[in-house]
Image (cartoon, helix red, strand yellow):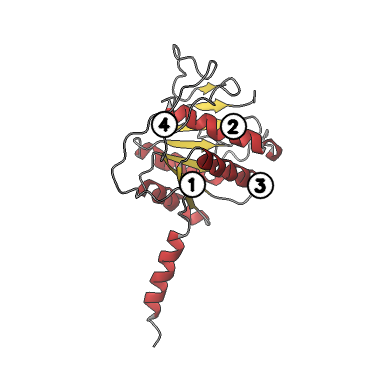
Amino acid sequence: MHPPLRAVAALTTAVVLALPLTGCTSGDDWSRPHPEPTAVGAPGPGFVDPADPPAPEATATPRPGSWTGVHPPDGYRVVLLTTGDDRPTKTLVKAVEDWAEDEHVDLRTVTATHPARLIPSITDALDLHPDLVVSVGNDLVDPLATVTPNHLSQQFLVVGAELAEPTGNVTAVDWSGASFRGEGLGMSSTYDATTFTATRCAAAIRAGAAAVLTGVTGIVLWLDRH
């Protein structure tokens, strides 16, 4: 006897919703209490001036490699929120995954596969209560601008793009060939997909994570000197 169609549909939906959530070290149950994450190590000279930190929404240009001394604690809970299958997005996703593996980050992924799922995908990421949500994909910029001001206790890191008016919980890493800002402005005239190299994308996730872990948030890190 075949199960009712409604039951089959419900099961299919549950499977589809579960598929985007993956983990590098996801043996940890994220529903259990979790200590406030603290940085392991400290940034080097030229990251930001500790005596005169950048103001909210400011742009800072860190010295290349000044972030390499900062690491997340083991088990740092990160959700990679992504959309799109273009080469720059794929390169950024790979950089985040490699960083998570190298740093023993507990990474889970939420992928928005349809425009109608952009804001719901952000909600899915928030529901996991991670230490950090890392956003990759230009189509997420405008939805993030809508959602993030209502969740100020959640840290977000946008890599390869930026919000036009970020709140203090949204940090971005950008460069001349990226710099997509949304708000109906279209793609930047300086956009260049070839600038999304594996080396630059790896630097972007590490620099951005260092900023969040050391409390330098709500700004744009500019990596043109990398």
What is the C-alpha distance between the residues marked 4 and 2? 23 Å
Q: Position of residue 196 (x, y in %)?
A: 66, 38
Q: Residues within 10 Å of mark 3 (few under 14, many from 20)?
A: few
Residue occupied by mark 2:
203
What is the C-alpha distance between the residues marked 3 and 4? 29 Å
Q: Residues within 10 Å of mark 2 (few under 14, many from 20)?
A: many
Residue occupied by mark 4:
167
Secondary structure under badge 1? strand
Q: Quadrant of residue 94?
A: top right
The tag earlier along the polypeptide, 1 or 2, is 1
Note whether 216 is above or below 90 in the view shown: above
* Residue 191 shows in the view: yes
The tag earlier along the polypeptide, 3 or 4, is 3
Name the amino acid, label 2.
Ala
* Front tag of 3 and 4: 3
The tag earlier along the polypeptide, 4 or 2, is 4
Residue occupied by mark 3:
87
The tag earlier along the polypeptide, 2 or 3, is 3
Secondary structure under badge 4? loop
What is the C-alpha distance between the residues marked 4 and 1? 18 Å
